[in-house]
Image (tube, rainbow, N blue to C red):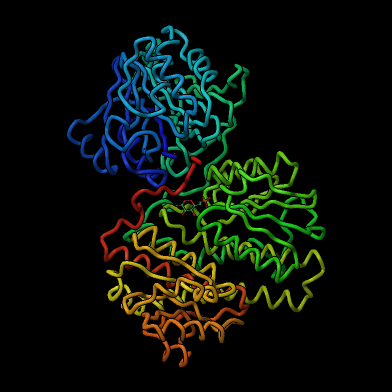
Amino acid sequence: MCGIAGYIGPKNAAQVLIVALERLKYRGYDSAGLVVSEGGKLHLRRAAGKLKELDAKLAAQPLSGHCGIAHTRWATHGPPVEHNSHPHLSADGRIAVVHNGIIENHVALRRELEGEGVVFASQTDTEVVPHLLAKYYDGKDPVAALRTVLARLEGSFALGVVFADRSDRILVAREGSPLLIGRGREPKAARTDDRRSTEGGTPWTERELLVASDIPALLPHASEFLTLEDGQIADLGPHGVRITTFAGDKVEARFRPIEVTAEAVSKGSFDSFMAKEIAEQPSVLTRLIDSRLRGGVLVEPDLGLDLASLRHIVFLACGTSWHAALLGKRFLEALARVHVEVDISSEYRYRNPVAGGDTLVVTISQSGETADTLAGLRLAKSKFLPVVGLVNTVTSTIAREANGVMPLLAGPEIGVASTKAYTAQVMALYLFAAQVAKAKGLLPRDAEEALVAAARALPDLAERTLKLCEPAVEECADLYSAAQASVFLGRGGEHPTALEGALKLKEIAYVHAVGYPAGEFKHGPIALVTKHLPVVCMCPRDAMYEKMLSNIQEVKARAGRIISVGDAADRDLRDLSDHLLPVGRAGDELLQPILSILPLQRYAYHVARRRDCDVDQPRNLAKSVTVE
Ligand code: G6P
């Protein structure tokens, strides 16, 4: 968990780093800090709470200096108070460290260091690192000291280190947590400014260098990036970037252009990233659909797999991505007649799953960094199973470790609650199922044409649905934002929608909410129904429509407040409901859940606003969960 950043270059490091932290907030935001190395000293600023607290501290006590590292935290070891915030310093204040991940053997290391007289200032696992570095650093070779320390660490980490006596060097190392290095544009001419390296007094002539857990935080200063691999150390300084393995072997630093724009990671005219990302869904869907077609015909994904021989698929995912996986199972069963299992990654990885050689594992993850899903991927690979990653972040670890990648092309998703990545995942799974069906000869030409037409019509329907449902959604949010709990019911393809709608409300509005298969509701949970309980009922005109109407009747008979989601022109449903959230009707019933979730995303957003919640940074959460 957590986000880390670093900067060396001609600009004010603290100012660059605070912007980078702003873009990493989604990885954790319960405290933040940064350190700048200047004039032979380390200058530290840290604050508990949201980033604005650190910003205020910096405004009151500004920092100059051109080399620094920074961190935004999601607490694992020790509560989110200032002394547990990163960076952490060695006892002599000469070495500072930021860390994303968990040092699993920190207790033993701490005992050893305490035995040697070191006094710890925090409860974190991270603090052992600066103390160990101080123990091994001889004032000459910082990389050698880091290499010695790394050999003693167990667990996962992305580390950033700066030294008081080297104010133009940042060292980073990676094992299990993401870390990218960015490089600025080539300077037009060698600068003649007065910025001097402390090492040898030579002017800084290299391009500026950045470090971050994710690409958005490298913007706008970096134009190129590289991904540091597990088991590698990078030494950043006036010499550029030197990469070696933990064992000391040299590795070539290969930079690639950054394709994400600064605009894609800003809110634009929206009040929150969540609102922006909800509104982006029609264009995201269009881009995704176009990427899977050539001349209006489905093309087979380049996964190095024989789709025609697929018999068995296992989906691994967490959170919202798991809800998309539930729909993926329906699509593959319905269109391609493939047997599919859906597993929550954190469960799969600790079982001993039975898997034959004909099993394909598909890991679904927006970030591509979720620790449990990554562990599931590695477990599957250890069993020699082919693994495909359905990911949004194509520079992620899952994307790099999977045998094949299906990109979502949704653009950076920054709001913690997943919205556009979810609908993109659902569409991508639908098109994947169609591609498998086609490869197996189960999708005749006319059926393919109808399927493609239904997919292509969906972005417009999504656009219209977002407009159409808004007044009713706002009215419901006004009426029910104070409700203590809510239930979401759906059948068939709308069961995952019910789960996802409930998750959105829990995540960002802190309302206790459960999603249920509507047919199962009568087996216990119906006891919850009173006239105070809003029950959101997914009732589009699909194969389960009549059954769903009966389930709604059961709730109505017990005085529950019915908010249904369905066709605007459905008189029966309107009469039965207290409120109807109207949605468009998809050309293929399988795609309907993409439309049905839209009013529920907006409902959660509006309820959260009315309850004064921060929709982009809900309490206790982080977007990218890189710890178990
Ligand atoms: C976190 C986020 C969820 C997300 C889940 C899986 O819990 O808060 O919104 O669905 O991780 O993330 P992934 O990046 O693997 O899709």
Residue 122 horizontal/vertical position (percent):
32, 26
Q: Residue at x 26, y 26 (%)?
A: 64
Task: Quadrant for residue 95, please give it.
Answer: top left
Q: Residue at x 64, y 66 (%)?
A: 430
For residue 112, side relative to residue 378 (left or right): left
For residue 410, side relative to residue 71 (left or right): right
Residue 593 horizontal/vertical position (percent):
54, 72
Task: Quadrant for residue 58, please give it.
Answer: top left
252, 481: nearer the viewer? 481
Is the residue 537 above or below the residue 321 in the image? below
257, 326: nearer the viewer? 326
Residue closest to the far left: 60
Is the residue 592 above or below the residue 72 in the image? below
Is the residue 492 above or below the residue 378 in the image? below
Quadrant of the image for the N terminus?
A: top left
Task: Quadrant for residue 135, please give it.
Answer: top left
Residue 41 horizontal/vertical position (percent):
29, 17
Residue 218 horizontal/vertical position (percent):
44, 39
For residue 366, side relative to residue 78 (left or right): right
Q: Is residue 476 visible?
A: yes
Q: Residue at x 41, y 53 (%)?
A: 416
Q: Residue at x 39, y 60 (%)?
A: 506
Is the residue 281 above or below the residue 168 in the image? below
